[in-house]
Image (tube, helix red, strand yellow):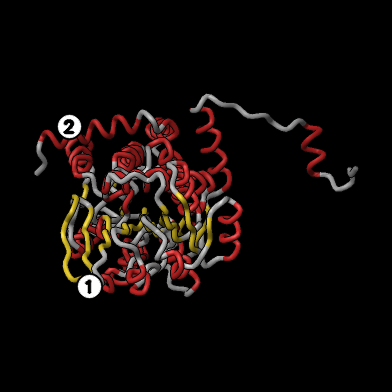
Amino acid sequence: MYKSKSFVRGMRRMVWSDTQMFVLQKIRLEFKRIKPLHNIRIAACLHVTAETANLMRTLKEGGASVALCASNPLSTQDDVAAALVKKYKIPVFAIHGEDRRTYYKHITAVLDTKPHITMDDGADLVTELHSKRKAQASTILGGTEETTTGVIRLQSMANHGVLKYPIIAVNNALTKHLFDNRYGTGQSTIDGIIRATNVLLAGKTIVIAGYGWCGRGAAMRAKGMGAHIIVTEVDPVKAIEAAMDGFQVMTMARAASLGDIFITLTGDIHIIRRDHFLKMKDNAIVCNSGHFDVELDLPALEKLTRSKQQVREYAVQHMLRNGRRITVLAEGRLINLAAAEGHPPSVMDMSFANQALAAEYIVNHYKSMKKAVYDVPTVIDVRIARMKLKSMGMAIDSLTPEQKKYLSSWQVGT
């Protein structure tokens, strides 16, 4: 099925990635020694990248049987999938560019392995199980969720009383979202736009829709490349923060006529709509770095389109009936994974360390966990932070007994 050249490229990617994932390396060595996941089956629905491959290797070293499918049709690195299958005998159900039917067929395939733990990125795996394979939930100990969008969906399920097993929100770990979402998404989003278009960002006006951790990261990196930043928000607190970070804040209705490049990072539907497309200047570029492609109302854009053409591998230019051109990148899917390689391995190191240790935590504590969404235990978060600092050759101070006493006292004042 896989060509030897593809296998070699995939192995090279994995090895290079692993050299920058020091925390996961340490966990892998520990897992190999104590086998905390012995006889545990894990179904993972994640972006099939070199970094994910190293997580799969870690889980397998811990004694788990792992099956992997993609969490996005355009994020799979086929050469990495080839290497996982051929070298590590880990089943991978993913093909770059797969259609919707194949995407869900692959999700079904990993669920067919009868997992004890689900590992999700966007909650498609969990949603599919809850909607079409409800009986299977009784054999699942727990699950983990990698991304903000997925946590929102799962928390909604918990609030409505339909969640059938406990989930650990890996995304909520400080060592995940403060770094992966901000620095990882920030850098890889800009990387994806540049690879897809080769445009110069300096002097451009870039509209960032959403000022969560991902939006902050993208705005920060775009500013560093010399772009002028406009932020659109629905949250007044985040809007104030964006303003105090030095960015213009306005509605999308106003920003639509000003932007050269538009990036959505909200996790919500139809952030850029028909009226916005109509106001955009000629040759505007539109892309999405939120988990699902629904952030751009592409059906509305199609209705406004007179003709369209593929101008670059990940860029389709729409000629609107009003004579203006709008270029959509990566079909409105995750620009950082579709047109680039996703987050750098050194930041995914912490995210996937959380995934591995969360899986171990579920095995040890599932009997006492309710059918709810849990944060990553603080002890795991702190442990990963300390390991990462050590890998970076850094050390921090410790509180003295006197300092600890002062901080815990209410009697000592001025």
For the C terminus, the image quarter is top right
The residue beneath circle 2 is 8
Dots 1 and 2: beta carbons under 8 Å?
no
**Towards the viewer: 161 or 4:** 4
The residue beneath circle 1 is 321
The amino acid type of the residue labelled 2 equals Val
178 left or right, relative to 98: right
Query: Local crowd at mark 1 within 10 Å, few (<14), some, or many (≥20)?
Result: few
Residue sticking out furthest to the top = 393
User: For residue 297, which quarter of the picture?
Assistant: bottom left
**Can the viewer see residue 4?**
yes
Residue 36 x/y as whole percent: 41, 41
Separation of disc 1 and disc 2 at Cα?
47 Å
Q: Which mark is residue 219?
A: none
Residue 303 x/y as whole percent: 23, 75
For the N terminus, the image quarter is top left
The residue under the point 33% across, 57% down is 287
Q: Secondary structure at mark 2?
A: helix
Query: Local crowd at mark 2 within 10 Å, few (<14), some, or many (≥20)?
Result: some
Q: Secondary structure at mark 1?
A: loop
Residue 283 x/y as whole percent: 28, 58
Which label lies toward us, 1 or 2? Answer: 1
48 left or right, relative to 313: right
